[in-house]
Image: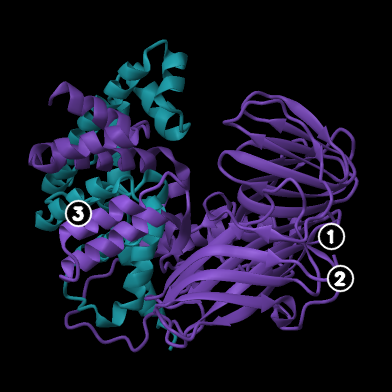
Amino acid sequence: MDKRFEELLAGLLDDELSEVELSELTELVRNDSSRQAELQSQLEAAELLVLAQDELHTPERFLAGLRTANKAVPDGFAPFADVQKSKSSSFLSIAPVAIAAALILVFVFWISARSANSIATIRSVQGEVLWMGDGGSLSEPQPGQRITGGTIKTLSADAWSVVEFLDGSAITVVGQSEMTLAKDDEGRKVVTLNHGAVSADVERQPKDLPMIVRTPAAEIEVLGTQFNVDAEPLQTRLAVNEGLVRLMRLSDGETVDVAAEHQVVASIDQPEQLQAKPRGTAAFTWKSDVKSDMRHGIWVSDIELLAKKLKAAVKRGELTSAAAMKEYKAAVTFSDSGSVCATPFQESKWKLTSRSLILLTVTNRSRPTVITEDSTFRIRGTFDGSPDGSFTLGISTNHRSGGFDGKYVSEVSVTESGESFDVEIPLRAFRQVDTQLGMPPGQKELTAVWCVADGSNTKLRVSVAELLPGSAE
Amino acid sequence: MEPSDEETRKFETLVLQHHVRLRLFVRSLGVDADWVDDVAQDACLTAMRQWNSFDQSRDFGKWLRAIAANIVRNELRKEARRQRIMHTELAEILIKRQHHLSAKAVSLDEPLTIAAVRNCIGELGPKSQKVVEGRYREDLRAPQLAELLNMTATNVRQMLVRIRRRLRECVELRLLKEAADGQTL
């Protein structure tokens, strides 16, 4: 086995290869069956070692997880329905079944015993939400469900869930987010926000046992306060509404105390001094910068779009290559204009329907963006593939100086399928996701804007999302 | 319609029998280590749904693996779900190769396989055993292991390649021997 291949193989199995090295490895194995065999053999052996060394991967646990997953599938799914008799009977050993059943019983008993040690209760669930208990099983969480520890995933843009610790401290996890809850050996509440957004109302904690909120970029120490956190892979934004919160940037250990009405951004790739800044006066208008605001979707530059259109025109014989090239060269600029596109995907394995989703964050501005009853949203883009020509425009809001307020949606009808649209939707056309009621009066902070279209063939592209001012500002 | 207890038992017994082989198969298609469980579960859920159309005289394991291969193929088509795959092009090559391979002769039934793996680990030298434990029980990466064992990260990775190669041979040999004469592993 040659040295370079072996080096790359070793790196692959240790999750250490860069994209360039992965491509190099791919080229090395592309037409070489012996290298392919070696690669597969190494992958299989690695999995065997995982199974032999890691007690979390027993077949009994796998089966228990499968049973829970099957139960969590929505109504209408009927496993084993109308089972046909097999053409030949197969030999079934009773012993493995009995052993498996006994192990599963022990597992269920273990889980039951743990429920006495619950640390929190799920208070509300909206939209697509999944719960993975610390036993590894997946389920759809139910309001009132007591939980020991584990991970909650809000999968859809219109989803949220409120989890309340036994002392009344409540964490609302919003949008497409993933949060793990636990109590450490010392009794501290530990919330790990792997990605997404949470809003927290924390009751006073003992001085020596603060609540800890961890994100990929920061660790936040809380003694009792209201604050909101947005976590991305490289940066975390903390906005404090009440009390005092200490944040530590994980890349260098630098800490900062963040007081009420202040915010801070901890970025692990920009090592400038951490500084809490006042949240600033409200802005009543907002215009997206789709490239930097995008949290779900694919950014495409205008020039890339033009190139695709020209290629298609050449292919159809409507344009010569020379004319296409001339038009392309004339259009090339160094500007960063573009749009965000969405392709259909399944939000979770439990829902077989596909959706296209574009999600834009609004909280990455220095001032809070505020909506009033007279505000209007303007959306520009193209839309195709929906039978009824409509998609949903949604917004997430926080209370003006507090935590999560709610999510609101409005249907947007596009009359000409495949054509570009430019629509204005007044705030009074929005309704609450959970109650279907209109938006209550008063100012709210806008935190996210999203567009979602159902269907496996929908093509949605947004070039501009904008909040136009109301008269109440 | 609720499944009968007998059918449920039959299905679950088959899943227990084929669990190891399924996971190895999924991993060998280039699925990221952290997502093997998820893809294997997807395959079993799909098999549950299609159980009534499965001819039970046929090879369940082969059917289950074909379902898993389809799931991985679908992953490759869907941009948003490729995170479960280590590298798209590499996975495409591995899937194509798998398609042309016939079933392997060695059975990988539980719990014999795991016992064989553990015995084979026991045959490794003390340092190799430490490397295996560190990597697969403690989830340490090569640089961390290198520091602990006073080696270079490159040496740790090379050692792991050799260990996995030796382990695969050792396990297959033990399982073949078991199949041939039924002796204790």
On screen, residue A4 versus residue A121, left or right, reads: left
Identified by mark 3, the residue type is: Ile
Mark 1 secondary-structure assignment: loop
Measured as percent of width and height from the top left, residue B109 is found at: 26, 53
Distance of mark 3 from mark 2, alpha carbons?
57 Å
Q: Nearer the viewer, residue B171 or A406?
A: A406
* Callout 3: chain: B
What amino acid type is highlighted by mark number 1? Answer: Arg
Amino acid on which the number 2 mark rests in the picture: Gly
Q: For this view, does B128 lie left or right of residue A29?
A: right
**Residue name at image x 44 percent, y 62 percent:** A341
Q: Colour of chain A?
A: purple
Q: Say whether marks 3 and 1 touch (CB < 8 Å).
A: no
Left or right placement of residue A23 versus residue A124 in this view: left
Which numbered disc, 3 or 1, marks the residue closer to the eye?
1
> Can the viewer see residue B106 in this picture?
yes
Q: Mark 2 sits on what residue? A: A442
- The C terminus of chain A sits in image quarter: bottom right
Chain containing the residue with disc 1 = A
Measured as percent of width and height from the top left, residue A443 is found at 84, 66
Residue A142 seen anywhere in this rendered image of the structure: no
Q: Position of residue B76 (x, y in %)?
A: 29, 57
How far apart marks 1 and 2 lie (CA) works out to 9 Å
Q: Is residue A229 above or below residue A436?
A: above
Q: How many labels sit on residues?
A: 3
For disc 3, the marked residue is: B95
The quadrant where residue A318 appears: bottom left
Separation of residues labelled 3 and 1 (CA atoms): 53 Å
Q: Colour of chain B?
A: cyan
| Circle 1 residue | A400
